[in-house]
Amino acid sequence: MRRVLTALLLLCVILLPAVATAQMLLPGQATQTTAEGLEIGTSTSEIAITSDFRGADLTIFGAVTNTDSLLLAIGQYDVVVVLEGPRENATVRRKERVFGIWVNTRSMTFEAVPHSYSMSSSRMLDDITTPLDLTDMGIGIDHIPLTPVGFVGNASNLGEFRQAFRRLQENGGLYDRDPSGVRFVSSSLFKASLRLPANIPNGVHTVRAYLFKSGNFVTEKSVPLRVIKTGIEQMITDAAHAQPIAYGLLSVFLALITGWGASVVFRKD
């Protein structure tokens, strides 16, 4: 009997700190047993480009699951949504004036960069997490990895060419950012808007959503988005790729016919 009492007393001493700790937990913390999840969906899974295409807006709907009610109430959850185009090598050239003529003197090619990139977030990226974390995950126009192909030469020019590439893409409408494009419509549901430029490239694009909690990355979700040409634009594209020689000869023939017809119409008698 003495041994049983001693064992029960020792068990109570061991469990007492755990019971006290459990009593000190906040209500939201006591019920947070599962990691947060993220689900997204798009307003359409396919964008058709026609001759009168002038750009479009893509709407993304999403939900954050298993949230902490306390952190949710004080706004500690952030969402970043990105539409990333097909990746391909991109070359940036620098022109200089040589003997009064502007010529390409230097160039740099970056490996597998997104041809287009649209981003929306619940607030400014720098307010969501640190620039180092953004760079590690490649989130944001300023943090897209731009890796040069081959021999760089003067490494001091690398930053200059990177800035030039981002500037050209933004000026052309292919890279876009909206720091207030993600809005929470309820405690856990959000909606995001992304702008698709008129010159958006063909191919399979990817919609990515990133979830952050108190500045820390939690999880991400991605879904594909197809951008295709339709009608005569698609027929011309298919012909140019499938029969390049015949397409070239036909283009030259049409140019000759057009030039001859213009000369006949506007001929001065």
Image (cartoon, grey):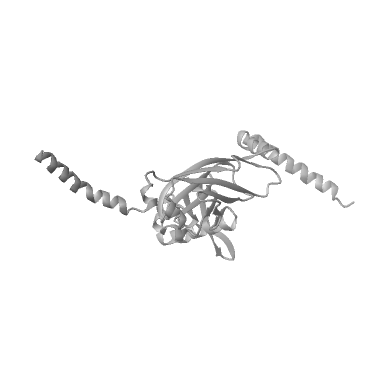
**What's the residue at 75%, 43% (across, down)?**
256
Q: Position of residue 200 (x, y in %)?
A: 60, 47
* Relative horizontal placement of residue 103, taking residue 36 as reference (left or right): right
**In the depicted view, which residue is nearer to us: 227 or 193?**
193
* Relative horizontal placement of residue 267, taking residue 180 as reference (left or right): right
User: In the displayed structure, would residue 96 be above or below residue 201?
Assistant: below
* Relative horizontal placement of residue 231, taking residue 227 as reference (left or right): right
**In the depicted view, which residue is nearer to us: 265 or 109?**
109
Count of residue discs: 0
Q: Is residue 147 visible?
A: no
**In the depicted view, which residue is nearer to us: 181 or 206?**
181
> Which quadrant holds the N terminus?
top left
* Relative horizontal placement of residue 127, taking residue 118 as reference (left or right): left
**In the depicted view, which residue is nearer to us: 72 or 11?**
11
**What's the residue at 41%, 48% (across, down)?**
218
**What's the residue at 56%, 59% (across, down)?**
103
Q: Position of residue 84 (x, y in %)?
A: 52, 47
Q: Identify the residue at the far bottom of this view.
A: 100
**What's the residue at 70%, 40% (across, down)?**
251
Q: Identify the residue at the far left of this view.
A: 2
Q: Identify the residue at the far front of this view.
A: 1
Q: Position of residue 64 (x, y in %)?
A: 48, 46
Q: Is residue 156 visible?
A: yes
